[in-house]
Amino acid sequence: MKHMLTALLLVLAIPLGAQEAAKQEAPTRFAFFTLGLLVQKSTKAKKVFTELETLQKSLNEALQAKADEGQKVQKQLQGASLSDQGRDDLKKKLRDIEIDYKKLQEDSQDKFTKVQQKVMGDIYQMAGPIIGDLAKEQKLQVVFSGESAQSGQLIQWADEKWIQDFSVEVAKRLDASPTLPAASKPATNPPAKPLIAPAVKPLITPTIKPSAAPALKKP
């Protein structure tokens, strides 16, 4: 009987021991990293990101100039004193402008995307090692994308300051680190998923009212 009671106590003690071990395990630790916030808070990251902003401004100005040209011809077409030949010539000119605009739009989007990828890669090459070191220092198991959290795709509610703390600390350490050479080699230990780029306004798509051609499509 004594042996039976001992065996029973041992069986009952196993789940209790497992529960105690689970209680003693360190809780999962994680943080959020927001690339857009890094660009806002870090002088170095902001300087790199300026290349994309400058390009975007230039591309938008070129698109706007071509759109203005089309709108000018459109107004000329509304003139009552035009001859049939003159009207036909203006319609052809407007169609040519619309074709040129669409080509410029496609080329601009392609160039913007390539520079955007380069800029994001350059920023990550600078910040990536700092993110890894800070995560190890804080004994984190995972670093989530702050962009997903801010857009409500990952969580329902969280302390906004707490979400930003990790990114702000990365920005401070990046600016305090020695000046790094321009990125030319692929970053080591890339994240499992590509970083989400900071929010930037899309290339503009001014409207040219067509007279004999389909409406322009947005990029």
Image (cartoon, rainbow, N blue to C red):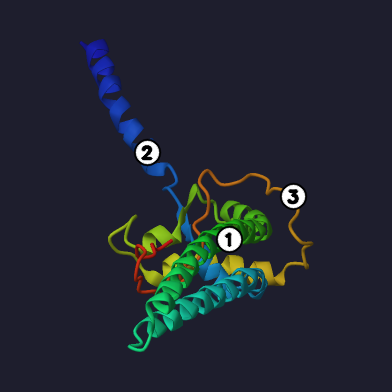
User: Residue 9: which disc?
Assistant: none
Tell me whether circle 2 and circle 1 mark residues in contact (CB < 8 Å).
no
Number of other residues with Cα within 10 Å of mark 2, as a class: few under 14, some 14 to 19, many 20 or more: few
Q: Quadrant of the C terminus?
A: bottom left
Look at the picture and state if 91 lies above or below 11: below
Measured in 3D between alpha carbons, the distance from the residue under mark 3 to the one under mark 2, in whole angstroms, is 44 Å
- At x 57%, y 68%, the residue is 169
Q: Which residue is mark 1?
A: 116
Look at the picture and state if 65 lies above or below 128: below
Instruction: First in sequence, mark 2 or 1: give its number.
Output: 2
Measured in 3D between alpha carbons, the distance from the residue under mark 1 to the one under mark 3, in whole angstroms, is 17 Å
Tell me whether circle 1 and circle 3 mark residues in contact (CB < 8 Å).
no
Q: SS of the residue at dot 2?
A: helix
- The three-letter code of the residue at mark 3 reads Lys
Q: Which residue is mark 3?
A: 185
Residue 95, percent from left and from top: 44, 67
Asked whether 85 or 78 is in front, the reply is 85
Q: Quadrant of the N terminus?
A: top left
- The three-letter code of the residue at mark 2 reads Ala
- At x 76%, y 61%, the residue is 182
- Mark closer to the observer (3, 2): 3
Tell me if I can see residue 86 in this picture: yes
Asked whether 33 or 99 is in front, the reply is 99
- Mark closer to the observer (1, 3): 1
Choose top left, top right, bottom left or bottom right for residue 14: top left
User: Residue 22: which disc?
Assistant: 2
The reply, left or right, for residue 140 in relation to residue 132 is: left
Number of other residues with Cα within 10 Å of mark 1, as a class: few under 14, some 14 to 19, many 20 or more: many
Instruction: First in sequence, mark 1 or 3: give its number.
Output: 1
Tell me if I can see residue 200 in this picture: no
The reply, left or right, for residue 190 in relation to residue 6 is: right
